[in-house]
Amino acid sequence: MSFFSTKKNKFLTKLQKQFNSNIIMNWSNVHKCILILILTLGVHFIWIGWKSFIFLNPTLWQWVNFSLLKSQIYFNICTASLVFVLIILCYFFQKKRWAETVLPHIVIAIFVNVMLFDGFLIGIYSPATIFAFVCISGLGLILFNRKTFYFQLTVALFVYFSLIYCTYNKLIPYAPLFSQNLLNHNPDRNFFWISSMFLFIMPIFITCFILCEVLLSQWRNQESFIKNLSQTDPLTNLYNRRFFNETLDTIQKNQSRYAIILMDIDHFKMINDQYGHHFGDEVLQRVASLLCSQTRHTDIVARYGGEEFIIALPDTSLAVAHEIAERCRLIIQNEILETVEHKNIRCTASFGVAISIYGIHINKVIHLADQALYHAKQLGRNQVQSFTDLH
């Protein structure tokens, strides 16, 4: 059980770190803006790389509007430089209160407009544009405050559908970056067009997938940590009373036989009064650890309240339960505890043991163990007593 307890404590510690970690969801709005700007910078590098590749390969010029392509390379370089400056400004103003409110609107607007403009260049209802719009919308809603993003999304949708309307009615050209030679001859059968769409889609897909996986993992970790908090006593890291009762209820519903050990630290109030509550907490933690070291991995050890602990032992006879309780009593009795004043003291504990039989409710079995514990205290404490009247 000591191994089980150690693993459980390490697991809780790991969850605590992840719960309090600074993984994206807990970032400030300014840090999220920096993330979006870095993604924007990455998109520009992809654009510059794609356009430069075409520029250096004359065999591909037939598929693009070459004059627009050349001007777009310079435009992307200038825009990338502007985005880099914005990243520096965000970093510089990250501790300013106004930045938390103002910068998200500016950054989201820049990001959305850049994506819309690029989408217009390659085709406003091309697969890459539609995929990017859906992914970015979902990511924006996850990262930012809904009120902040909804305004930008509404504007973006208006612009997007306006471009679709104008393109459909031939008020503006469709996919002006590609040549009419490509657009008029089934682009979906053209390797250059298909590979270009793939190039635009994959970075967005991979980025969104990684970010969503990180966010979902953190949410899962938070849920797991909260669940463990609801089951665990924060001082001793043992199960709490509520979870213990739920587990025992499940055991009884399965009609399994079980034993109950109820334990109480002797004269605990005197320890608190004489050495202080901090030392009293250390005693509780040490006793909890000792109980776990003497029980089996199938047993359920819980703090039942104050200085009281309870152990459920599934499929265990009264004799075996009594033996386990005696081991626990001895190891607690022999444990040396050092106070703040460097004084060595020992503490003892009293134990009551009861076993379930068919038809008896959980509360009754615990009550019988409590009666046995009371009997142990009456007889002088630091001993194990079993309730055997039912047998």
Image (tube, grey):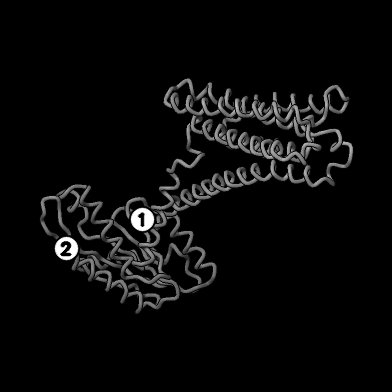
Is residue 138 visible in this depiction of the protein? Answer: no
The answer to whether the residues at label 1 and label 2 have Cβ atoms under 8 Å apart is no
Give, as a three-letter code, the residue at label 1. Asn
Q: Where's residue 306, x and y in %?
A: 30, 53
Residue positioned 57% across, 43% down in the render: 211
Residue 73 placement, left or right of 282: right
The quarter of the displayed image where residue 167 is located: top right
Where 196 falls versus 248 (above or below)?
Answer: above
Distance of mark 1 from mark 2, alpha carbons? Answer: 21 Å
Q: Where's residue 255, x and y in %?
A: 53, 72
Q: Where's residue 234, x and y in %?
A: 36, 50
Give, as a three-letter code, the residue at label 2. Ile
Pick whichever, 104 or 369, lies toward us. 104
Is residue 245 visible in this depiction of the protein? Answer: yes
* Residue labelled with disc 2: 336
| Quadrant occupied by the C terminus | bottom left
- Dot label at residue 105: none
Residue 204 placement, left or right of 96: right
| Quadrant occupied by the N terminus | bottom left
* Residue labelled with disc 1: 237
Dot 2 falls on a residue whose secondary structure is loop
